[in-house]
Image (tube, rainbow, N blue to C red):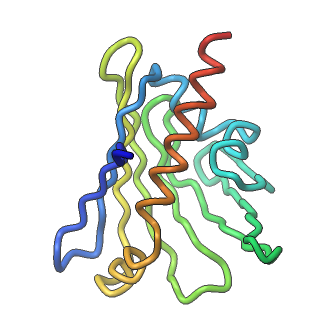
Amino acid sequence: MEKKTKINAEDGKQEIVITREFDLPVALLFTAYVEPEIVEQWMGTKVLKLENKRHGSYQFQTTDPKGNKHNFNGTVHEFEPDHKITRTFEMENTTFPVQLEYLTFAPLTMHTSQLTMHIVYKSVADRDNMLKLPFAQGLNMAHNRLQEIVSKLNKR
């Protein structure tokens, strides 16, 4: 299956840029990132907290196949509805330091949109270690679920 989520990781840089086009209006794509019930469905995680505002915070929890719980959290620094979210992201109890994420939501047509995620890591080594994980495959699968789930909402 084609990976529709594209990841650009230039050698020697501590950042990656992820892009994905969706067959969704930009408002619905943005909603998929800010409505806890929808986030839980496409991310396959529990939303413990999601404050969609400047200086807000979020906390998600996922359970691995062995039943271990893992928390992810961050702080929202910028929040412009249907346009952008700038936030930190931390995986608790791992060796990965906090990363900075710039999420930009752009309309392509009335019915399509693009998500661009610019992620900055503390170091090139941290970025490279993240890319060694099944990160790209997991993100593509999550974005495929997002497209499927939110498309059904769009037809209501």
Q: Position of residue 54 (x, y in %)?
A: 58, 47
Residue furthest left as drawn: 11
Residue 62 vs 18, above or below: the answer is: below
Q: Tell me residue 82's x, y (percent).
A: 48, 29
Figure quadrant of residue 115: top left
Q: Residue at x 83, y 74 (%)?
A: 67
Number of on-image labels: 0
Q: Is residue 67 left or right of residue 50?
A: right
Q: Nearer the viewer, residue 82 or 2?
A: 2
Residue in front for this viewpoint, 156 or 14: 156
At 38% from the left and 21% from the top, the residue drawn is: 112
Q: Residue at x 39, y 46 (%)?
A: 1
Which residue lies at the image location 41% right of the left edge and 30% below the top edge?
Answer: 22
Quarter of the figure that contains the C terminus: top right
In the rendered image of this protein, does residue 34 appear above or below residue 103?
A: above
The correct choice, above or below, for 116 with respect to 134 in the image is: above
Relative image position of residue 137 (x, y in whole percent): 44, 60
Which residue is nearer to you in this view: 40 or 36? Answer: 40
Q: Residue furthest front?
A: 1
* Residue 4 as seen in the image, left or right of residue 33: left
